[in-house]
Image: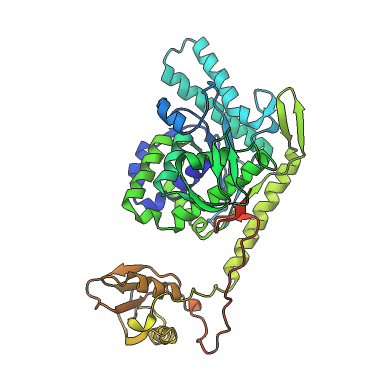
Amino acid sequence: MVASALVLVLTAAAWGLYRDITAGITTTDVIAGGNDDGADNILLVGVDSRTDAQGNPLPPELQRLLNSGPDSGVLNSDTIILLHVPDGGGAAVAFSLPRDSYVDIPGYRQDKINAAYPATKALAAEQLVADGVRDRQRVEAESAQAGRSTLIRTVENLTGQHIDHYAEINLLGFYNLTTAIGGVDVCLRAPVDEPLSGARFPAGPQTISGAGALAFVRQRHGLPEGDLSRIRRQQAFLATVADKVLSGGTLADPGKLRALIDVAQKSLVIDSGWDVLAFAQQASDIAAGNLEFVTIPTRGLETNTRGDVVLVDPGDVRTFVDQRIEEQQRSAEAAREAPPAPPPQVDVIAPRYVVDVRNGSALPGMAATVARRMRDLDFSSGTVDNTDPTSTSTVHYTGSDAKAARAVAAQLGDLPVESNDEVTPGHLLVVLGGDFNPAVLPAPVDDAPARPTATPAPSAPITAAGVPCID
């Protein structure tokens, strides 16, 4: 469920409908104090609420479709993730907290971490009623705020990280998100048939959505490590959703875009002081896969008065969190200093297209250099000239030549492409601007080493790039 919250938050800038979105999103005042280190720590919470974000009950037929089971009246925060985005963006790291982690809950008692929100919410509701409050909406809103605040303090005490922002998603939001984006690609090592969650899937790669996607991330029975295996599934699922929405063209589809906005307004709760637009701009690197998913260290299982619990040591957790944040930041800095990866192979019949190049940058001779590169790739040579200074590099095309324009753009650092009726069919016009980076141009074909013919298989840890096979 938390996949919805992360994706909806991170894509706000690209939507271009920021005011429309935020006007309809439910907010909650749960963040105490501030942190001036420039980084953002976001607590992402998935709840199995049978209501929408405004507290309206879901229709019984939808509850049956979600396979959500009977409503016990107890709200469970079954997915808890701390997302750290460093100052200035860059590589982010997401820490999964097992829901059965045995922790100290401020103002309550030692219990499973997923009791922090519902238990203190229930206590706050009882106190409000005892104080004479009869407005059900007020009781619901104020008690939920108390429960969320307690969960935030619990996570802060466990991880040693100050929480800057909060995002919560419910069952309805998860269901609608996966449907809106046209499904999510996953891969299973073995077939699954588990009736408690409704998870029934074959082995291998597949696309799931709606109730099937919900069953996929909720299953914990029949998995090798129970809840820890489920966390691994949620991490892989979240990584794939983030990659699909941020990098897969979902935001360019008006229908899917509107569906995502509807999901946010019906099912997302965020803290009231969050400037989502500014954060989305800061976190833009996540679209490039610079997001790592890990689980906090645990010390085994125990059965006590609170049931089966996962033992955690706050000292171990804080050290682990600090180290992974530092490691991820160092990796991101090293990646920025590394030479750019070679561009992909051209997947169009290059000789069919004439490439014209105009240099609007401050780099003398760059049009000729780019034209030479296009000839090396077997594109037909067009005109080469200078043009008025421009800040942005683009590739222009007309009619049905969009695929060829994208192929050329990929060779030049993934430049944006634009349809332009003034371009002759069969021609592609490359305009080089002040933002063009000559380092994206590889050595001429005759001197270039042979490119590998296979891509190595993805390896742990899970990141927002690729679809790993999991249990």
Residue 76 vs 363, above or below: the answer is: above
Question: Is 469 on the left-hand or right-hand side of 207?
Answer: right
Which percent across, then down, holds residue 151?
A: 59, 32
Which percent across, then down, holds residue 451?
A: 57, 79
Residue 430 vs 310, above or below: the answer is: below
Residue 158: image quadrant is top right
Q: Can residue 55 be seen in this view?
A: no
- Foreground: 436 or 216? 216
Residue at figure coordinates x 32%, y 51% from the top left: 254
Residue 355: image quadrant is bottom left
- Foreground: 139 or 190? 190
Colour scheme in the image? Answer: rainbow
Residue at figure coordinates x 62%, y 42% from the top left: 230
Question: How many marks do you count on the picture?
Answer: 0
- Foreground: 50 or 109? 50
Which percent across, then down, holds residue 362?
A: 39, 80
Residue 42: image quadrant is top right
Outermost residue, left direction?
Answer: 422
Question: Is 293 on the left-hand or right-hand side of 55?
Answer: right
Q: Is residue 259 visible?
A: yes
Which percent across, then down, holds residue 367?
A: 38, 84
Residue at figure coordinates x 51%, y 15% from the top left: 128
